[in-house]
Image: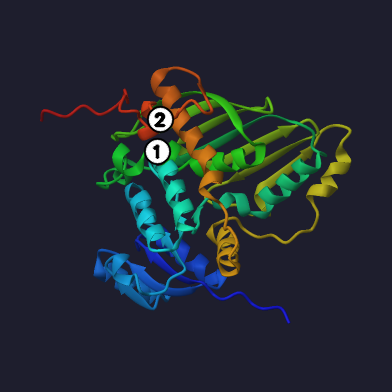
């Protein structure tokens, strides 16, 4: 008789808006909801009552003896790395909401702590786990689509000024960046996941319509090691919101248009002339499952329960964070940036704006 893996005991740190998505995903994946941690006791109590966590606590240290297996970190980005380091030191597996860190230096530090602890960090890039992305990856791997050629990756969202007026938003040292780091990162993570290592990027960015320290839009041209070329737009000033990805291969075009999550109905497959037989490979009758936190958490919880490595590892997330850093570096310096350029000694290794950001708001004398 096959043994059922134990249900991992889970905690959540930070009980704001995104924590609800993590709680629901943990519940659906079969984890035990043990403790909700928040510095605001009233918010933690309300969250626990709504989501089913058994207890609350003001800090991770306060529940060090709760025999947790995993904690999901759902706080503002500036505390992601420090809380992950604390959790690893306590012998816990970690799930990090995006962005997993504010800089490439923090990513390197987290990887070192992960190796020392023997535990694992999983970064939330949930669009990798929708059935469409998995199907496209399998077809690509089989070779039937031919070589990747060109495409685009557009995150065209809308956030009004009130969104940025929240005290911790739009600040380099709190969010790590604007829509490139905090919004479009999900889309271009899936692009990189499918098309493999990027080689170089040329980018522009600016603060065109919002009062914020960071950019409110960026646009980039990315060349991949395969030779494929893609444009990438990250915007929060686009009134008609949409998320679009297009992948042109030698034998087919595959398109995805959605907003904050997709299912099979959001994909479009167009065979090249003479390749019409490929249409049947896409319409294979597989079950329609939405992308989102539950899709990734099903793999995370299973891996933790069985003692294997959960996805997406820090090493697997690094190329995505490196591209975000390179978009900023290219936009701010006016130079093309190659993968591997941003290392120790490069100002963009420590901070996304390299402390050189040219569109920074001037202090008002009023």
Most distant residue in the front direction: 116
Query: Residue 165 location in percent, x, y?
Result: 26, 44
Q: Is residue 244 left or right of residue 107?
A: right
Whether residue 276 is visible here, answered yes or no, is yes
User: Do residues under tags 2 and 1 come within 8 Å of each other at their CB atoms?
Assistant: yes
N-terminal of the pair, mark 2 or mark 1, is 1
Foreground pick, 156 / 309: 309
**Residue beneath label 1, please?**
105
- Characterize the local packing of mark 1: few (<14), some (14-19) or many (20 or more) Cα atoms within 10 angstroms: some
**Residue beneath label 2, please?**
344
| In the depicted structure, whether residue 276 falls above or below residue 126 | above
| In the depicted structure, whether residue 25 falls above or below residue 358 | below
- C-alpha distance separating marks 2 and 1: 8 Å
- Residue drawn at (47%, 29%) of the image: 326
**Kind of element beneath mark 2:** loop
- Residue drawn at (65%, 28%) of the image: 225
State how the image is colored: rainbow
- Characterize the local packing of mark 2: few (<14), some (14-19) or many (20 or more) Cα atoms within 10 angstroms: few
Q: Is residue 67 left or right of residue 338?
A: left
């Amino acid at each position: 008789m096959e043994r059922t893996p134990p249900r991992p005991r889970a905690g959540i740190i930070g009980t704001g808006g995104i924590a609800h998505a993590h709680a629901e995903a943990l519940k659906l994946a079969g984890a035990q909801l043990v403790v909700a941690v928040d510095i605001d006791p009233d918010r933690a109590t309300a969250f626990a009552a709504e989501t089913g966590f058994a207890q609350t606590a003001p800090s991770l240290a306060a529940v060090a003896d709760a025999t947790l297996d995993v904690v999901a970190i759902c706080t503002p980005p500036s505390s992601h790395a420090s809380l992950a380091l604390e959790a690893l030191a306590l012998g816990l597996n970690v799930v990090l909401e995006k962005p997993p860190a504010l800089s490439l230096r923090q990513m390197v530090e987290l990887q070192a702590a992960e190796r020392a602890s023997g535990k694992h960090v999983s970064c939330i890039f949930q669009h990798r786990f929708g059935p469409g992305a998995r199907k496209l990856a399998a077809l690509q791997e089989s070779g039937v689509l031919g070589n990747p050629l060109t495409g685009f990756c557009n995150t065209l969202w809308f956030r009004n000024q009130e969104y940025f007026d929240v005290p911790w938003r739009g600040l380099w040292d709190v969010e790590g960046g604007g829509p490139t780091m905090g919004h479009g990162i999900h889309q271009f993570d899936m692009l990189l996941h499918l098309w493999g290592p990027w080689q170089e990027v040329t980018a522009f960015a600016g603060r065109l319509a919002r009062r914020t320290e960071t950019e409110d839009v960026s646009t980039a041209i990315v060349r991949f090691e395969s030779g494929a070329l893609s444009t990438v737009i990250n915007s929060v000033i686009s009134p008609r919101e949409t998320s679009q990805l297009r992948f042109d291969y030698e034998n087919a075009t595959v398109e995805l248009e959605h907003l904050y999550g997709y299912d099979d109905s959001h994909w479009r497959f167009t065979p090249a002339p003479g390749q019409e037989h490929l249409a049947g490979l896409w319409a294979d009758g597989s079950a329609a499952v939405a992308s989102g936190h539950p899709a990734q958490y099903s793999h995370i919880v299973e891996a933790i329960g069985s003692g294997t490595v959960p996805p997406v590892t820090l090493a697997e997330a690094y190329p995505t964070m490196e591209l975000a850093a390179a978009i900023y570096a290219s936009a701010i310096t006016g130079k093309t940036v190659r993968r591997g350029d941003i290392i120790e000694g490069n100002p963009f290794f420590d901070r996304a704006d390299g402390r050189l950001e040219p569109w920074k708001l001037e202090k008002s004398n009023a």
